[in-house]
Image (cartoon, helix red, strand yellow):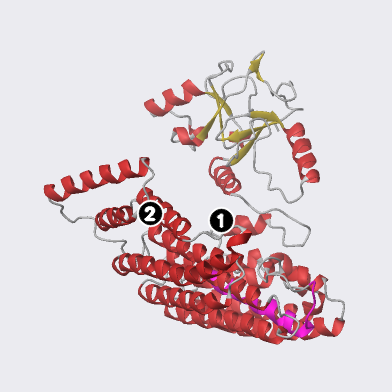
Amino acid sequence: MHGIKKGDKTFEVSQETITKYRKLVKLVFARKAAKKYDDQTLMLTKTVLGLNKEFYSLWNYRKDAISSRLRDEVDFEKDEKDKEEESSKESETYSLLPELISSELKFTEAFIAKNAKVYPVWDHRMFLIITLWNRYATHSVKESLRTVFRDILENEISLCSKCLSVDGRNFHCWNYRTEIRKMYENEIYLHYKDQITTTWESYCSELKDVALSDLEFTQSMIKSNFSNHSAWHRRSGALKLLFKASLLEICGYDDYLFIPTYSAPLSKFIELVSDHSMIIKLTEVISDRIKLEYEFSQAAFYVLPDDESSWRFIVWLLRDAEWWNDNLDTFRSEILASFWTMVEELIKLEDSAKWPKLSILLLSELLINYNGEKKTVDVFRKDDVFLAFYYKNTKMGGDGGTIATKRDVVVQQIRERLGESVFKGQSLYTCSISGKPLEEGNICVDKLGNLFCYDVILKNLIDKSMPLRFSHISTRKNVIRINSKVFQHGILCELSKSVLSKSNPFFVYSPCGCACAKGLCEQIIGFEMEISPQKDMIVCPACRLKYLERIEIGS
């Protein structure tokens, strides 16, 4: 993937090694069944994982063994009469725990040095860090462990940097690094929690340092490869943290603002601020930073104009970012105007590039709202079917509009190639090819809403005798089988008990094949959205399974 191979899978293994491996696996699973978690377990799993580092079950067994060993060697739950002994035990704990975790981290680091794309290894390291964090965060003795914990987190960040310098798009490593950064933010919060009233500035400063460090790192990764989607994505997270830290710094200490910084969007923080002058200061910080991000992104646009990573970042930055408010309207308008001018210039240089044009479409509503006029469509090539149709159906006049789907494009292409005749005379009770009555269990529909007998479709595909007006059906995948019942040769909606007709169109859902009355479907969706507005309605109303596509018939 991305030009960096996961590893050589063509190596030869001797029969002796295979025999040894099988015996060891059998022995390890026998010990696992017996729930043995001693030192021999760690030794055996280490040997087997040396032969097969992607053996996920063994990594889980090793996790169980480590957890058991920690429970056995250190017991924090003591009776009141043993408090004095408990105190000495706790001091032993914090010397033992980092040593055990550190040795296990070194063990997994050897695997990463050979192959950094083995997911179970990264998952095991995350388990180790979380184990250490749980001990650190849930017990009263924290200062003695903080330095050790910080050192380990810094080491993990350094390890990720080394791995990403070799393969900048190793998403296993990027995901791990993101989790470590979140834990780092957590640690800062926990450290300052008890004395926050006197150390507020230090708290905000450390948060900003984490954000600026991430921005510097992602910038270096992007400069080495503008197509690094993971780096662009992490950069968006660093910007969120930077702006939140800036808000906390500007507002000063406040009980309502002092919560883990990653747990709420910036807009929620801003709602808590009543002083308008503070909002103005934050606006200046945000606008200055966005200018830098916009200028930095332009280099990627000109170097790789058709790579989506930088374009997705700029669309997020200008359209979807959570910090936009009324105080930034003028600045946003200026940035959008500059962006449009830049894209026009870029399209003249790279007319075949898709993403400059698509970014304009994705930002079309904003461009209309802030620039007040409909932009020209001359930038879109006439032979670019998707973009031209996308533009046409996005309603650039600012009246809401809809976004063209893949099905819309297919329908448009068929209309242009075969004319409107393919849509005329659609029968709701007989097969559109043979004229045979529709029978339960033998009905299918194409993307245009034409109904067929499934056996007729199969026969025409096998004989290669598909009528010209249905030539868009070239495989069985071009039709959806309907599993609803039939009443007097009409498809029956199981929910409303109504029959398909011109006045009662249906929706057919794929891949489940359920057919439901359109009016009822819209009522159900409207009712559920009213109850839970945040819910993404992508389920079939009949079977409640997720659907990929919805075809309308009878309209």
Q: Earlier in the sequence, mark 2 or mark 1?
A: 2
Q: Residues within 10 Å of mark 2 (few under 14, many from 20)?
A: many
Q: Residue at x 71, y 33 (%)?
A: 555
Coordinates of residue 283 in the picture (x, y in percent): 76, 82
Q: Secondary structure at mark 1?
A: helix
Q: Which mark is residue 62?
A: 2
Foreground residue among 242 and 203: 203
**Residue 517 shows in the view:** yes
Q: How many marks?
A: 2
The answer to whether residue 208 is magenta is no
Determine which residue is flagged by label 1: 386
Q: CA distance from mark 2 to mark 1?
A: 52 Å
Q: Residue at x 45, y 63 (%)?
A: 128
Coordinates of residue 308 in the picture (x, y in percent): 52, 67
Q: Quadrant of residue 215?
A: bottom right
Q: Residue at x 73, y 73 (%)?
A: 323
Foreground residue among 262 and 72: 72
The residue range painted magenta reads 233-256
Whether residue 404 is situated above or below residue 202 in the rendered picture: above
Whether residue 288 is situated above or below residue 231 in the rendered picture: below
Q: Quadrant of the N terminus?
A: bottom left
At label 2, the amino acid type is Arg
In the displayed structure image, the side of residue 471 where residue 273 appears, left or right: right
Looking at the rendered image, the disc whose residue lies closer to the viewer, 2 or 1, is: 2
In the displayed structure image, the side of residue 492 where residue 133 appears, left or right: left
Q: Residues within 10 Å of mark 1 (few under 14, many from 20)?
A: many
In the displayed structure image, the side of residue 182 where residue 151 appears, left or right: left
Coordinates of residue 301 in the picture (x, y in percent): 52, 77
